[in-house]
Image (cartoon, rainbow, N blue to C red):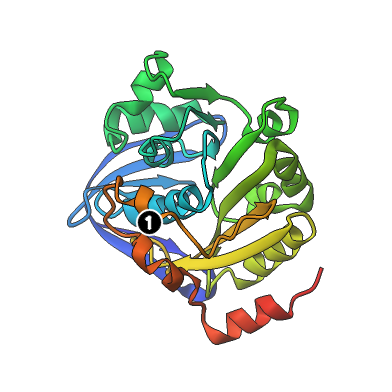
């Protein structure tokens, strides 16, 4: 038995499957959980791979730690999406964090991740029960929450599905303006932005929209297990921070497997033609 996620132009990423653990539908999407031969459990939403249990840090670490270490003192963090718990798990590894709010629209994703996946190490249950003093989990619309929030955040992390279909709203100029407004005087925003090779147009569109809003925008890529790598990420800066530099002293406190703060500069390697497209794009 196999599971294959098909990308544009007939490109697929596949896994050998031992068994299907569950399949269900929520108000928002179809959810599947499989046991793979070599990568533990596989979480699939609407036919797209969200993560594999063995190797999920190859996504969550570059999504979280580069921006956290680039900010001089990230105390308040907002996570939009991330129902599997991996992103907020990584956020709370930082001792400077006083409050981390996670807003996930689909409670079924949280339930399945909490009861059947388990990469959160019990964190999701503690959040739901109000037993995590530095964290809060809200089941609701993250877009509306961010737009209406009176609170200002140091870091905003959007852990969403791919920049196609309904998720395109999360890559719009309006959404980025709301994010910019929800940041403090100095803040950092990050989002995943899809496959460098197969979602190049979507990456370019998101980059252009971010450049209209943020004081500075960076792009980088990382090889993510289970995705059509290299995978792209976009970072928006509000204020005078330099994303090319990270705090290596704080990094020593972290237990990391994939993202290497001492080689932070390697994040910015991008295929030549993609870099030229990005640098040649205008607002």
Residue 230 is at least partly visible in this image: no
x, y (%) of residue 151?
67, 27
Residue 191 lies left or right of residue 119; in this view the side is right
Seen at 66% across and 71% down, the residue is 201
| Residue 234 or residue 246, whichever sits in front | 246
Residue 43 is at least partly visible in this image: yes
- In this rendering, the answer to whether 107 lies above or below 4 is above
Residue 182 lies left or right of residue 131; in this view the side is right
x, y (%) of residue 49?
41, 53
Residue 192 lies left or right of residue 14; in this view the side is right
Residue at the spot of label 1: 248
Seen at 38% across and 52% down, the residue is 61
Residue 26 lies left or right of residue 119; in this view the side is right
Furthest residue toward bottom = 272
Seen at 53% across and 71% down, the residue is 196
Q: Quadrant of the C terminus?
A: bottom right
| Residue 142 or residue 163, whichever sits in front | 142
x, y (%) of residue 3?
33, 57
Seen at 45% across and 71% down, the residue is 265
| Residue 43 or residue 267, whichever sits in front | 267
* Label 1: element kind: helix
- In this rendering, the answer to whether 113 lies above or below 4 is above
Residue 207, picture quadrant: bottom right
């Amino acid at each position: 038995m196999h599971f294959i996620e098909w990308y544009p132009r007939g490109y697929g990423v596949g896994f050998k499957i031992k068994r299907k653990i569950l399949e269900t539908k929520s108000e928002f999407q179809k959810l599947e959980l499989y046991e793979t031969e070599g990568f533990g459990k596989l979480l699939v939403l609407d036919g797209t791979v969200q993560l594999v249990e063995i190797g999920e840090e190859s996504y969550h670490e570059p999504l979280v730690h580069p921006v956290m270490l680039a900010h001089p003192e990230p105390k308040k963090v907002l996570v939009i999406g991330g129902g599997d718990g991996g992103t907020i798990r990584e956020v709370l590894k930082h001792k400077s964090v006083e409050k981390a709010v996670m807003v996930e629209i689909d409670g079924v994703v949280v339930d399945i991740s909490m009861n059947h996946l388990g990469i959160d190490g019990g964190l999701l249950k503690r959040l739901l029960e109000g037993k995590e003093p530095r964290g809060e989990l809200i089941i609701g619309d993250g877009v509306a929450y961010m737009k209406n929030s009176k609170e200002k955040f140091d870091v905003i992390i959007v852990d969403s599905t791919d920049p196609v279909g309904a998720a395109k709203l999360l890559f719009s100029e309006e959404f980025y303006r709301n994010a910019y407004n929800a940041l403090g005087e100095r803040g950092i925003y990050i989002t995943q932005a899809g496959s460098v090779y197969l979602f190049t147009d979507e990456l370019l569109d998101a980059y252009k929209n971010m450049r209209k809003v943020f004081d500075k925008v960076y792009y980088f890529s990382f090889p993510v297990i289970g995705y059509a790598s290299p995978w792209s990420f976009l970072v928006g800066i509000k204020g005078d921070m330099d994303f090319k530099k990270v705090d290596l002293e704080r990094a020593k406190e972290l237990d990391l497997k994939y993202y290497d703060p001492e080689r932070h500069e390697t994040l910015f390697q991008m295929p030549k033609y993609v870099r030229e497209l990005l640098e040649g794009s205008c607002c």
